[in-house]
Amino acid sequence: MSKVFAGGTPALPNQAYADAGVDIRAGYRAVELIKNHVRGTFTPGVLSDIGGFGGMYSLARIKDMDDPVMVSGTDGVGTKLAVALMMDKHDTVGVDLVAMCVNDIVCCGAEPLFFLDYIACGKNMPERVEQIVKGVAEGCKMAGAALVGGETAEHPGTMPPEEYDLAGFACGIADRKNIISGETIKEDDALIGIASSGVHSNGFSLIRKALSIDKEKLNKHIDELGMTLGEALLTPTRIYVKPVLSLIKAVEVKGISHITGGGFYENIPRILPEGLAARVNTGSFPVPPIFGLIRRAGNIGRDDMYNTFNMGVGMVICAARENAGKVCAKLAEMGEKAYIIGNVTQGNGLCLE
């Protein structure tokens, strides 16, 4: 394996390893290309530079907390990478990688501190690695997290040379008394949806099947979308960290759900106490046209759509009904589109109206 964040004195060229399919020199080249992107994410807590065996981050700030709790999350980008490969566009999937992790941990009210990435590839292509990490760095800046380490591993013979996969890990912190657990949610509380930027990073196996995707289709401009299909599908996942952290300081928030894999049906009930259900009015928010395109092309039923995709809502906030207007107003101040999409009721699971 070739460590992207490796440093120190470069080793001698290893011809035997190169003959086996691992180009160490490509790893060195990738390191040089990504250095500025990585350092651009560093926050005051970062104690290590590129080149160490472990990324170090100061926890001095926990002295100001009564009971500090570390909150972590890990995820990938999934088969959205197949679209990136067809389009030969790799500068946005890094944003997706960060988003899928930090959007999860902020649901607890945690502030992301640092992030690590892992790139597995059939062949290390330094310029492509730079584009991927550039996106990761951009996502980290959006989330206020430092990119403190990573790994690029060549897998010759087990992955085709042109293919790669991504995984990421985020770690955040919260004071235990401020953790948002959903335990105070009660009947008639309001559900507020925050608009997504598109399909985000879930359901791409179904998307690729429904749309029978190939390179020609991806590059075709679609009037309904106002862009090419490929551009619409590669729109990066929205990162909600900063607006959500600002929101919970201004208004009492009882629960937060990231609408990720499993769509509405799986993710909203996850935050509800036993005996309570979510009732969602599907006419209360606009559904972006990309979802209509997918539904028609694949002849997919409504329930399956809401059980797979975010349908235009990337995050759901639960708050007391009397605070719902305040939540929407505060989010609007931060440039987020928010809608009261339903309420909590007795029962189990989720009901769409």
Image (cartoon, helix red, strand yellow):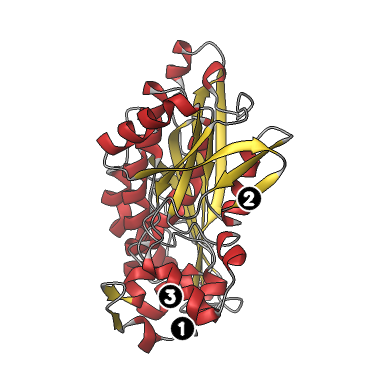
Label 1, label 3: how far apart the Cα atoms are: 13 Å
Quarter of the image where one finds residue 179: top right
Under circle 3, the secondary element is: helix
- Image position, residue 50 (x, y; %): 37, 44
Q: Earlier in the sequence, mark 2 or mark 3?
A: 3
Q: Is residue 88 visible?
A: no
- All told, the count of numbered labels is 3
Tell me whether circle 2 and circle 3 mark residues in contact (CB < 8 Å).
no
Q: What residue type is disc 1 on?
A: Ile
From mark 1 to mark 2, how far is it between C-alphas? 32 Å
Mark 1 = which residue? 213
User: Mark 1 falls on what kind of element?
Assistant: loop
- Which of discs 2 and 3 lies nearer the camera? The answer is 2
| Residue plotted at (36% across, 22% down) | 250
Q: Is the residue under label 3 in contact with that under label 1 (CB below 8 Å)?
A: no
First in sequence, mark 1 or 2: give its number: 1
Q: Which residue is mark 2?
A: 351
| Secondary structure of the residue carrying numbered label 2 | strand
Could you tell me residue 10's position as x and y percent?
39, 56
Residue 245 in percent (x, y) is at 40, 30
Amino acid at the residue labelled 3: Leu
**Residue designated by label 3:** 293
- Which sits in the foreground, 122 or 326? 326
Which of pointers 1 and 3 indicates the residue nearer the eye? 3
Is the N terminus in the top left, top right, bottom left or bottom right quadrant?
Answer: bottom right
